[in-house]
Amino acid sequence: MAETMTNVMEEAAAVAEAQMADQASAQEEVQAAEQKDQSSEAKWYVVHTYSGYENKVKANIEKTIENRNLGERILEVRVPMQDVVELKDGARRTVSKKMFPGYVLINMVMDDDTWYVVRNTRGVTGFVGPGSKPVPLTEAEMKPLGIHVENVSVDFGEGDTIAVVAGVWKDTIGVVQRMDFGKQCATINVEMFGRETPVEISFAEITRMR
């Protein structure tokens, strides 16, 4: 009898340990998913370049984006410009000049691939940040640069049926497959050439079906 009770207790302990392990594993998966979602958000970063190479760097990165299909992770490359009034020979003229010579702004999802692509672009000397570690710009830092971040509040999510109310896909009805809050758009499947194809629709062009 004592031996039987011992076996039962050992089995119960093993089951409880397995359940705890499963719960811990599930929690780790949730945390990993949350971290992945956070890391998949595009942010604005500043890259330092050789003087006079700003436009060349911009063009080279944009070409790499196209060649390597990185359009979903490197969204925009910008050389901030400003209009300046110059006086020459008594005449006033407005010319466009770089706001920050030697710097390029990039809206990107930071990961190993995108970091490597940008950092190894000819003319780039590094990301701006402590120890060359990329640090995204804050909203306060972006405003003087003419970069505006609008967080659109939506009442739909993955799995919801939505209707497109504007744009190329107006009057299309579909189910949301993916939400991208960094790009402020949702992915739905539409029928093209006899098969379903995923397309991205701006949050502003979508309404939830009631």
Image (tube, rainbow, N blue to C red):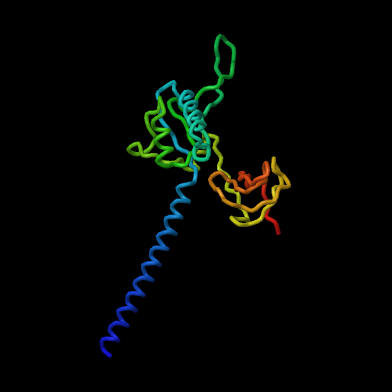
Q: In which quarter of the image is the C terminus?
A: bottom right
Residue with the most extreme top position: 89
Q: Where is residue 119 in the image (x, y as percent from the top left)?
A: 39, 32
Closest to the observer, 170 or 135: 170
Q: Quadrant of the N terminus?
A: bottom left
Q: Where is residue 70 in the image (x, y as percent from the top left)?
A: 50, 37
In the displayed structure, 39 sits above or below 102; it is: below
Residue with the most extreme front position: 194
Residue with the most extreme right position: 171
Q: Position of residue 141 (x, y in %)?
A: 48, 39
Quadrant housing residue 96: top right
In the displayed structure, 6 sits above or below 108; it is: below
Marks counted in the figure total: 0
What residue appears at the point 38 percent right and 65 percent down from the top-left corner? 24
In this rendering, position of residue 56 left or right of residue 191: left
What residue appears at the point 45 percent right and 55 percent down from the top-left corner? 33
In this rendering, position of residue 103 left or right of residue 154: left
Closest to the observer, 141 or 6: 6
